[in-house]
Image (cartoon, rainbow, N blue to C red):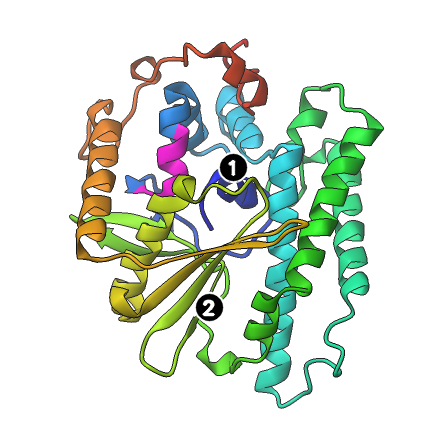
Amino acid sequence: MAASGSRSARGAVARRRVSPYAARVGTLENNFSWSNSRAATFERCRRAYWWQYYGAWGGWERNAPPTTRLAYVLKNLTSRWAWVGSAVHEAIEAILKRMQRKALHGQLQFGESGPDVEHEVEKLTEAMRDQYRQSLTKRYHENPKRNFGLMEHEYDDPVSRDEWKKASEKARGALRSFLTSDVFAHIAASDPKAWLPIEQLDQFHLDGIGIWAAPDFAMRTPDGGAELYDWKTGAVNPERSRLQMACYTLYMEERHEVQPAKLVSRLVYLGPDLHVHEERFDTLQLRAARDEIRESMERMRALLADPEKNVAEQASFPLTDEVSRCRTCVFRRLCDR
């Protein structure tokens, strides 16, 4: 994951992933890296970017300064709509991993009628209810990584019961859409031994800089290629995810030795009318993607006080002029907006 608007939020929901920071002799170092979600945060607001990747650094330490600790707490929050995407992704991840474990142990996956869709939907609903109740207590201030938190609860935003219900129904509908789709039937009929690690954060490199990628699902094909899937719960907008999918193609080539010509990437928009957008990236498109990533990294590093040591000063990262964006930002308390 990631990625996209939901990708950062999914980091806020407790997930078992590789840390995106290098460890040296047991000490975490804040090394510069790039990801699609990091680039999106930078373009949205320089100050939010600073809080996310620099101001919150070290906030997990017991002796962290109060502002650093607060920034760390806030960066782990998510909004209710990003929560929908996170919850659906986690439900799909759990289902696929369960399928894989059973298949590898020679156990039957489902009956002829397939999975019990409504049972899985109810499990998702109960998990979201538990997270909602957990957020209400605001115990995420004690341990942000172990306790789920919603931005709406932190800021006491007025959200009606109907609005919360709409978020729940959107998540339920998205999971139902996935489990009754041809996409899921295709995956369920495949050999789990051909599946690549599910939702695992990994890294490849461009000009010596780590580039993070976490495809939702990918599996090898008999011709030496692969199929890659990314689940979406928002509006259909393939162009918004173009760089993300190109990045996944570069990742699959370097880390899994899948040639771009043999990789089929599919954006799967989960809704009442499931939509699948399929594309492949050629040499010229991938060259353009590399250049776009390089330009993004250059803009980020240009604001650093010491690019070699990845040192950033808050004053070099100004607040956005589009104040309307602040209403949906988890850091607005720190910016007095």
Q: Is residue 250 visible?
A: yes
Amino acid identity at mark 2: Pro
Seen in the image, is 161 located left or right of residue 45? right
Please name whichever residue, 124 or 177, is drawn nearer the observer in this view of the structure.
177
State the residue at coordinates (82%, 30%). 162
Quarter-wise, where is residue 92 in the image?
Answer: bottom right
Which circle marks residue 197 in the picture? 2
Q: Which residues are magenta?
A: 34-41
Quadrant location of the C terminus in the rendered image:
top right
Q: Which residue is mark 1?
A: 60
* Distance in Å between CA atoms under marks 1 and 2: 28 Å
Tell me where residue 148 appears, x and y as whole percent. 67, 40
Q: How many marks?
A: 2
Q: Is residue 309 visible?
A: no
**Mark 1 / mark 2, whichever is N-terminal:** 1
Q: Secondary structure at mark 1?
A: loop
Tell me where residue 191 appears, x and y as whole percent. 51, 83
Tell me where residue 2 appears, x and y as whole percent. 45, 47
Amino acid identity at mark 1: Trp
State the residue at coordinates (33%, 74%). 225
Q: Is residue 111 above or below residue 65?
A: below
State the residue at coordinates (49%, 58%). 216
Q: Nearer the viewer, mark 1 or mark 2?
A: 2
Seen in the image, is 221 located left or right of residue 116? left
Looking at the image, the residue that sits furthest to the bottom is: 106
Please name whichever residue, 214 or 187, is drawn nearer the observer in this view of the structure.
187
Residue 147 among those drawn in magenta:
no
* Main secondary-structure element of the magenta-colored stretch: helix
